[in-house]
Image (tube, coloured by chain):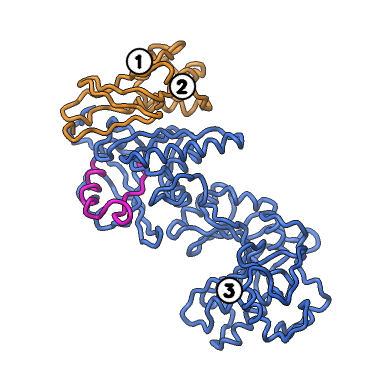
Chain colours: A orange, B blue
Amino acid sequence: MKLITHNMLTSNIIKGVTKGFPLKIVAPTDKVQIVEVDFNPEFTSRMMHKLDYDALYTAAETLGHSEGLPKEVVPDFETNEEFLKKVHHVLMQIEVQEGELVCPETGRAFPIHNGIPNMLLKEDEV
Amino acid sequence: MATSMKTSTKSENIPVSCEIEGSVVTGFEKIAKDDIQDKFDCPVETHRGHVTMTIPICESPNALDLQCVDNLYVIIYQQENMGFTGNKEEDLKTIRAIVPLLNWQLGLEVWSKFIEFLHPVAFEPQKLEVPENLESASAIGPEDRDKTDTATTDCQAQNDNEETDTENHYDPSLPKFRASCNRTGSNHSFQSPDVSVQFGGAIQDYFGWNVDLKNHDIEVIVNIIDDTVRATIALTKSSLHRRDITNFGQTTLRATIAYNMLRMCAIQPGEVVCDPMCGTGAIPIQAAKNWSEAVHMCGDIQPAAVAKCQNNVNDVNSKRQLEGQTNIKVCITRWDVTNLPLKDNCVDVFITDLPFGKRSGSKFDNRKLYPDTLKELARVCKQGTGRICLLTHDRRTIQRAMHSVSGLWKRGRFLWTNIGGLTAGVFMLHRLTQSNKQPTST
């Protein structure tokens, strides 16, 4: 699972949950990989407009890969290629292979296996 | 007689352009035309089931990179008003007679750019005599036989043997060929097998090529639609839609259909594209390959589907690495489409092949699944600019479902197509802006 996916996932699917974003990531260090993905500044710049930056920063920090990433969005980031490169790195190049996504409201854990989160609920949770 | 090729000659009557025909799944012809015009900036015409592009011969192999077409052919003859009389013998003779008139020089030149054959193939018969009446042209064949039986003998040979008929020696310096016929029309005196036999026989008389219906180097096709005849040489041995999927499911969507549906969505760089019922991943893989500047997400409820989707993505990437290309990025999640774990208003394009209710799911289940899906997609889809593209055979259920959410979506483009023998519709919906509705929770 890449952090770009994590930036869109919520546990509001659980009955009664309204503040299910962002999910907390729990993952052993050896199950977090770095893969190489081509950097495209225009793509990253456009994604910046859609992202929840705080959630991205927190997730990267939790996984121990936030070095060099500013805590807050840099002004005129659209032309700041160095900043965009760092965003690209945490957004696209970090992959969680095994672990859990935890609902911030209920603590319900959704497993991640082979890089794929399982967001299916049991019948009594819907 | 007419061949509609451009033959702007440079020297020795060598044509510069050729007409390449690409077969397209019914319904998507206009979409394929737009795609080819974008990619090649060349004239393109649409016809039923195929498009025709006029491109320079030297650039013709680029047609293999097209994602919207299945099979490619080079056109070597086109004639309207053939003048079929309704007399079978006469009409078949008319068909045989076109063989020397086909643009073999152009056709074989283009063919040689697509299919490898160890020896040069002459575009004219190598005998001195070119008889007018092919039926009695025993001089041209390598053996002496009464020519009126040739077609039948050839027919027997073609039907019985994979190699040439027993009276022709197999000549390895000559190509193996096959003649095929596609016929549409209600007033023909002949049927397609009659034509392929006669046409093939005439070609064999003309060139002396070896006959092989299965492992041929050259396939010559004659298409007869009412009184129009169009002859082509095949450029692809295997359809171009056979790509990128190694782990198939029961209803894996053809790559060219997935691609053409994606074209309808007009995906922009930086957009989030999602197939929420992705199955084995046909759509997200074509999307990620061809729109690399967008974000590609997908998901399915079934574990087998999700696993196969991941395997397909991995296999595509292994192949791409060998070819020096960058990996495609597809984010897969296991989820329930009617209860998506996604924030409101965050996906620009949803595109999916809905369960038809035939091989997958059931029409009964669709009655709940379709409206629930449309409501959930409305929540997640970006208001005002978001759109969805849906493929389904279950027309009644989808129309009822669209009715139930009519305040959320505006209907867009629609077309009919054919999926494995079933009539299916492709529906585009555009997300309306809800300025009056209550804000939904994040």
Task: Find residue B125 and report its image quarter.
Answer: bottom right
Query: Dot 3: within a 10 Å radius of its alpha carbon, few (fewer than 14), some, or many (20 or more) residues?
Result: some
Q: Which residue is mark 3?
A: B229
Q: In the image, which disc is placed on residue A33?
A: 2
Do callouts 2 and 3 point to residues on the same chain?
Answer: no
Rendered location of residue B296, percent (x, y): 42, 35
Please, which chain is the residue tagged with disc 3 on? Answer: B
Q: Looking at the picture, which amino acid does disc 2 mark?
A: Gln
Query: Dot 2: within a 10 Å radius of its alpha carbon, few (fewer than 14), some, or many (20 or more) residues?
Result: some
Asked if residue B326 lies left or right of residue A25, the reply is right
Q: Is residue A67 above or below residue A24?
A: above
Q: Nearer the viewer, residue B54 or B219?
A: B219
Task: Find residue B6 and report its image quarter.
Answer: bottom right
- Give the CA separation, mark 3 to mark 1: 67 Å
Asked if residue B376 lies left or right of residue B158, the reply is left
* Residue B386 visible from this viewpoint: no
Please, which chain is the residue tagged with disc 2 on? Answer: A
Please, which chain is the residue tagged with disc 1 on? Answer: A
Q: Looking at the picture, which amino acid does disc 3 mark?
A: Val
Q: Which residue is mark 1?
A: A58
- Give the CA separation, mark 1 to mark 2: 17 Å
- In this picture, which residue range is highlighted in magenta? B350-375
Q: Is residue B96 above or below residue A9?
A: below
